[in-house]
Image (cartoon, helix red, strand yellow):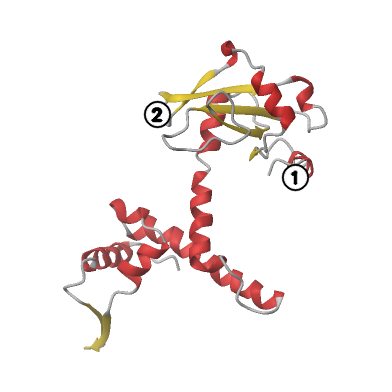
Amino acid sequence: GGTHDFVSWLAKRGRWLSYSVGMVITDTIHQHILKIPASAWTPAIETGGEARDGAWVAELTGKLLDGWPKGMRLIVRKERPHPGAQLRITDAEGMRITCFATNTPDRPIAELELRHRLRARAEDRIRAARATGLRNLPLHSTAQNKVWLEIVQIALDLLAWMPMLALTGTARLWEPRRLRFRLFSAAAQLVTTGRRRVLRLARHWPWTGEITAALARLALLPNPG
């Protein structure tokens, strides 16, 4: 998202919109990173406020920001890579380098970096979207594929709300493929008896308990109508 056009568009929305967008590390940015003194690096933090092991953040200022919207801040993080990770050409001194831009003022850069790092939840949603039909557009015309995308979006909304409302524990972390195998594809029989509908699930299915518990939790929710 770190392009001049997009960041300028965000800036025009006003101070009420606080953005945090990833930046490509250009050669110019890379050269500025190499010149950051050791004293300018601040330890990154975890969600509990404790220092993140092997990670530091710093803010880039000066002429590097010329041509960008007023109030934009450029924050860089360096972190020791995980064992076996391959470094990129934009990394430096054996450290993995990432960079992002934000317009949020008066907050410590470590706090802003943590907020930006937690955006990984959005990447989880993108991965779920691809597993739910977004990987390919199967139809011929644009209009038909728009309908397909609407259907995918409805499915993603259901996948986002269902774990929060119906599931507990590690089941809340299951992604679409695992949900399809364990819950959605469970064999069942819908029986009408005594003016009631009864859903009969196979006792031997390992996740029948998860399904019945989820249905019980949903039944306790107030009727939104």
SS at mark 1? helix
Q: Is residue 166 above or below residue 43?
A: below
Q: Residue at x 24, y 66 (%)?
A: 207
What residue sits right under mark 2 in the picture?
Answer: 48
Q: Do we see residue 91 in this rendering? A: yes
Q: Nearer the viewer, residue 18 or 222?
A: 18
The residues tagged by marks 1 and 2 sit, at their Cα atoms, a distance apart of: 32 Å
Q: Nearer the viewer, residue 35 or 173?
A: 35
Q: Quadrant of residue 212?
A: bottom left
Say left or right for 170 vs 5.
Answer: left
Q: Residue at x 42, y 25 (%)?
A: 53
Say left or right for 78 vs 64.
Answer: left
Q: Are marks 1 and 2 in contact (CB under 8 Å)?
A: no
Tell me residue 150's x, y (percent). Answer: 59, 70
Disc 1 residue crowd, few under 14, some 14–19, many 20+, Cα 10 Å: few
Q: Do we see residue 222 in this rendering? A: no
Tell me residue 200's x, y (percent). Answer: 22, 79
Tell me residue 103's x, y (percent). Answer: 68, 32
- Quadrant containing the N terminus in the rendered view: top right
Q: Quadrant of residue 113?
A: top right
Disc 2 residue crowd, few under 14, some 14–19, many 20+, Cα 10 Å: few
Give the foreground label among 1 and 2: 1
SS at mark 2? loop
Q: Nearer the viewer, residue 174 or 159?
A: 174
- Quadrant containing the C terminus in the rendered view: bottom left
Q: Is residue 27 above or below residue 171?
A: above
User: Which residue is situated farthest in the top direction here?
Assistant: 39
User: Which residue is situated farthest in the left direction here?
Assistant: 203
Mark 1 or mark 2: whose residue is earlier in sequence: 1
Amino acid type of disc 2? Gly
What residue sits right under mark 1 in the picture?
Answer: 6
Say left or right for 95 vs 101.
Answer: left
